[in-house]
């Protein structure tokens, strides 16, 4: 039993070691994207373009953190499903009050 | 009495209890910030005084950029501390976890300078709705950092004794503490552009 | 197993889910009684306006009359206490905590210490709420919905209300995390999803609603605290005038924002109140008709769908905020859609009765009472979900009647049913049937006396939250006499609870002792655990599950019930 545990631990360790390189790459990507998004804010884009660009970059960074650091890319389906529902409801609470306000202004 | 699957993974779900627990907690955190982001969108929509467009000019973007980099680095050291445990290297774990704690403290110090500069210029949450949401979002985020620091501090010192008794259990705990820490980083990744750059 | 635990460790700061469940139950029942008393005081003012309140008038200040500001406080606190401190903790904290692990064959909840802390957060939240009554200006008085700007400029009680809510929300979140983890991770061998008792299913869905709907209200609560304490203007529009003076605030905020965030919680909250009740009724119907629950899978899928839909109907509470037609059409449509799964569940429960040899014990009577009462509550909701009719009915007594039918004779009856059904499991003693039946019939009679006239008053256009019950309005004059009918019914309803309280006391003292499965039930809490279940661990041997939850009257079986833990011979 104990031997089995250690062997399993060693296998995991070997797998993890491979990931270290990934983590460093992700870190570099995050740093570069941070600089890019700050630089872009000085370009004088229109507010629509600026929103689109900044949120796209933020989403990419967010995906990198969630996918690699939080291991979501390889996580169990149960957790992915729960987070899927959560993100859907997040979008609802984020956009419906906004849509209601737009609709009110229009009618 | 032992609770099943406290340490080992349940075969059919592939998870240990605390991992599901912390993900559920993070799901509720997503909704908490969802409510606050919703407030941001709603207030920006109805912003007659133009405070949202003018607000970021009052903020210190270089300092905030530095803070973003500090937090991202702390996320990497956090994941590395977990990797060290997986590779049975307790010394390296201590090194990486204390770096994380140090970077978190650095984040707070930089934030302190930012806040006090605002107060000196007579800018408070009551100044306008932009600064109201700025202070609320960054303040709540800061509370999350402080809470996370308390947890990391515990695992660095008194909590680390568990490593000797139950290494797998301790590694699990660092993994889920890491999940929380990365989440705090994730929130900042979105706060930074919407508060400082747009 | 820790032997000889100290008293405080065993009964006060216990980590045993059963003790925590009992703590939740007793606290929640006390709060229910307290909230009910607040309402009985309000009903005096409505029946006999501006006359001294008997018995407790001396508490209300000079003259013993119920003043308008105190009336508002009592109204706000009645709603808050009944929902957040009474019904939800009883349904989720008490029954959920006690019976989920037992029904799925687990030794405890997944996180026992978290479980304890969630009770103490709840307790602290309750204490903070009650403290409001002793502040200058009294407890919160802006309604349980706390709409700004009124709530923003209200007396200090509102700040305390917000702090109390933050504590209660924290408690709910911890509880929800625990419930979901327990159900996903700790199901015993053989307890597959479609073998789970319906009560556990409804608790699982409820936990998801609590987990995901509460945080936006927590966010809104934080924003309102900022508004009140740091003078921000999240919910304050520009140029607001109070008592003839323009407020010295920056403005630029929106009261509508609060309504969105509040109802994003508060609509799912309705299903938090009703789903566990449906689960309890399902258990009791199957057991007392000695038949499998009709349409078990339809009930499960409908509950999931109901839970999901409950997140996208909230704006039907806001039709009168000047909402545009497109959004209002969307929310009217979703509101009509959500009635479908409710009807599927209720219909399944009613069809379950068909052809059963029904045992009419107290638990079954309350469960049967739930069915028509919830049906009235649900059906009267339809006109409120359609903007055209809601414009007339909005904020009238019709609304009060509607949601009280859902929650009071609906959910609370189901909770009483649960108390009668599970009491033998918790204590090893059976509640007295005569007193139980008296409790049921009197409650049934008077509770309809309280709420049925509200529909008539509401249709006549009488507003809710009026201190004089509408006496100054000419259009109310035709239906004002009903106020006295409702008030007398309410006090009689209060008296009708006395047999219940007596029943609890005498049964605990010298009630009829029963064995571990007095109802001949199939689910694990009855079939595999002693009464009361063992401290810290529940079962002597963790049971395994071989069949679905409701195998009653199976042709060819030796008994009219086959427990889930019974191995079949021919397999």
Image: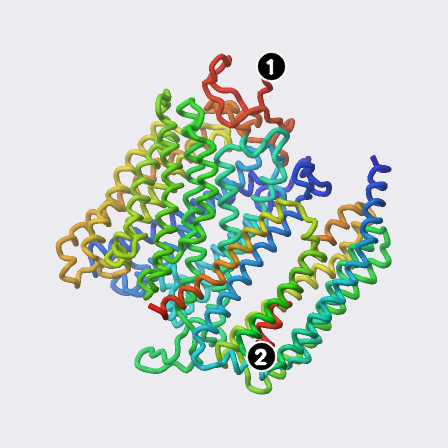
Judged left or right of residue C155, residue A42 is right
In-front residue for pair C108/C195: C195
Figure disc tally: 2
Which disc, if any, is residue A45? 2
Q: Considering the image in quadrants, where does the C terminus of chain C appear?
A: top right
Quarter of image, res C139: bottom left
Residue positioned 77% across, 50% down in the render: B171
Q: Is residue C56 visible?
A: yes
In-front residue for pair C296/C481: C296
Q: Residues within 10 Å of mark 2 (few under 14, many from 20)?
A: few
Judged left or right of residue A1, residue B197 is left
Q: Which residue is mark 1?
A: C569
Residue positioned 43% across, 30% down in the render: C295
| Label 1: chain letter | C
As drawn, C326 above or below C29: below
In-front residue for pair C231/C505: C231
């Amino acid at each position: 039993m104990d031997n089995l545990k250690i062997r399993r631990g060693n296998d995991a360790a070997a797998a993890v070691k491979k990931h270290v390189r990934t983590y460093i790459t992700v870190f570099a990507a995050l740093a570069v994207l941070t600089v890019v998004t700050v630089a872009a804010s000085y370009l004088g884009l229109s507010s629509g373009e600026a929103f689109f660009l900044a949120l796209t970059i933020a989403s990419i960074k967010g995906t990198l953190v969630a996918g690699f650091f939080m291991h979501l890319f390889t996580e169990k389906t149960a957790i992915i499903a729960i987070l899927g529902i959560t993100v859907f409801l997040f979008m609802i609470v984020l956009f419906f009050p906004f849509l209601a306000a737009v609709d009110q202004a229009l009618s | 009495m032992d609770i099943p699957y406290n340490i080992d993974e349940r075969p059919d779900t592939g998870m240990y209890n605390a991992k599901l627990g912390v993900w559920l907690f993070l799901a509720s955190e997503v909704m908490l910030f969802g409510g606050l982001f919703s407030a941001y969108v709603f207030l920006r929509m109805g912003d007659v005084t133009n405070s949202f467009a003018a607000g970021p000019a009052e903020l210190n973007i270089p300092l905030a950029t530095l803070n973003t980099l500090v937090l991202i680095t702390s996320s990497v050291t956090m994941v590395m501390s977990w990797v060290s445990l997986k590779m049975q290297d307790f010394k390296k774990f201590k090194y990486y976890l204390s770096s994380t704690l140090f970077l978190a403290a650095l984040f707070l110090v930089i934030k302190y300078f930012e806040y006090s500069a605002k107060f000196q210029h007579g800018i408070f949450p009551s100044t306008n709705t932009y600064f109201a949401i700025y202070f609320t979002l960054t303040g709540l985020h800061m509370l999350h950092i402080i809470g996370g620091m308390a947890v990391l501090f515990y695992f660095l010192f008194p909590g680390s004794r568990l490593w000797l008794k139950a290494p797998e259990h301790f590694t699990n705990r660092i993994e889920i503490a890491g999940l929380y820490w990365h989440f705090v980083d994730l929130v900042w990744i979105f706060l930074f552009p919407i508060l400082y750059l747009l | 197993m820790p032997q000889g635990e100290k008293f405080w460790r065993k009964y006060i700061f216990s980590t045993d889910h059963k003790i925590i469940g009992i703590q939740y139950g007793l606290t929640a029942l006390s709060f229910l009684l307290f909230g009910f008393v607040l309402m009985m005081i309000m009903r005096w003012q409505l029946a006999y306006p501006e006359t001294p309140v008997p018995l407790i008038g001396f508490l209300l200040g000079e003259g013993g009359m119920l003043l308008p500001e105190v009336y508002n406080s009592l109204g706000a606190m009645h709603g808050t206490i009944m929902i957040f401190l009474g019904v939800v903790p009883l349904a989720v904290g008490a029954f959920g905590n006690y019976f989920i692990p037992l029904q799925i064959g687990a030794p405890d909840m997944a996180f026992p210490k978290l479980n304890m802390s969630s009770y103490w957060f709840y307790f602290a939240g309750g204490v903070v709420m009650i403290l409001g009554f002793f502040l200058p200006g009294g407890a919160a008085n802006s309604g349980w919905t706390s709409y700004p700007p009124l709530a923003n400029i209200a007396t200090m009680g509102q700040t305390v209300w917000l702090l109390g809510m933050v504590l209660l929300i924290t408690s709910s979140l911890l509880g929800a995390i625990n419930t979901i983890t327990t159900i996903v991770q700790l199901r015993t061998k053989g307890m597959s999803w479609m073998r789970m008792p319906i009560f556990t299913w409804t608790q699982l869905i409820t936990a998801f609603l609590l987990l995901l709907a509460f945080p936006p209200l927590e966010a809104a609560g934080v924003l309102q605290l900022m508004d009140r304490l740091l003078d921000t203007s999240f919910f304050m529009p520009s140029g607001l005038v109070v008592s003839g003076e323009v407020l010295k605030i920056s403005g630029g905020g929106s009261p509508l924002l609060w309504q969105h965030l509040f109802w994003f919680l508060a609509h799912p909250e309705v299903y938090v109140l009703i789903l566990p009740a449906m689960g309890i009724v399902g258990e009791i119907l199957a057991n007392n008709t000695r038949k499998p629950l009709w349409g078990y899978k339809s009930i499960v899928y409908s509950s999931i769908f109901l839970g999901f839909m409950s997140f996208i109907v909230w704006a039907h509470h806001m039709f009168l905020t000047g909402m545009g037609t497109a959004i209002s059409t969307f929310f009217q449509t979703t509101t009509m859609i959500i009635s479908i799964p409710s009807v599927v569940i209720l219909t399944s429960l009613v069809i379950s009765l068909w052809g059963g040899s029904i045992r009419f014990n107290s638990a079954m009577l309350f469960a049967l009472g739930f069915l028509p009462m919830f049906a009235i509550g649900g059906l009267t909701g339809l006109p409120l979900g359609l903007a055209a009719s809601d414009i007339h009915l909005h904020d009238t007594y019709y609304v009060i009647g509607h949601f009280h039918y859902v929650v009071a004779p609906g959910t609370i009856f189901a909770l009483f049913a649960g108390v009668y059904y599970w009491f033998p499991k918790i204590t090893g003693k059976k509640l007295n049937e005569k007193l139980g039946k008296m409790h049921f019939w009197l409650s049934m009679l008077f509770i309809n006396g309280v709420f049925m006239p509200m529909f008539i008053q509401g249709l006549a256009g009488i507003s809710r939250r009026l201190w004089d019950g509408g006496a100054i309005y000419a259009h109310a004059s035709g239906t004002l006499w009903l106020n006295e009918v409702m008030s007398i019914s309410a006090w009689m309803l209060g008296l009708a609870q006395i047999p219940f309280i007596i029943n609890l006391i005498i049964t605990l003292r010298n009630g009829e002792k029963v064995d571990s499965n007095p109802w001949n039930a199939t689910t694990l809490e009855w079939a595999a655990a002693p009464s009361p279940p063992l401290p810290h661990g529940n079962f002597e041997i963790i049971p395994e599950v071989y069949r679905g939850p409701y195998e009653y009257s199976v042709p060819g079986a030796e008994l009219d019930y086959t427990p889930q833990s019974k191995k079949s011979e021919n397999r």
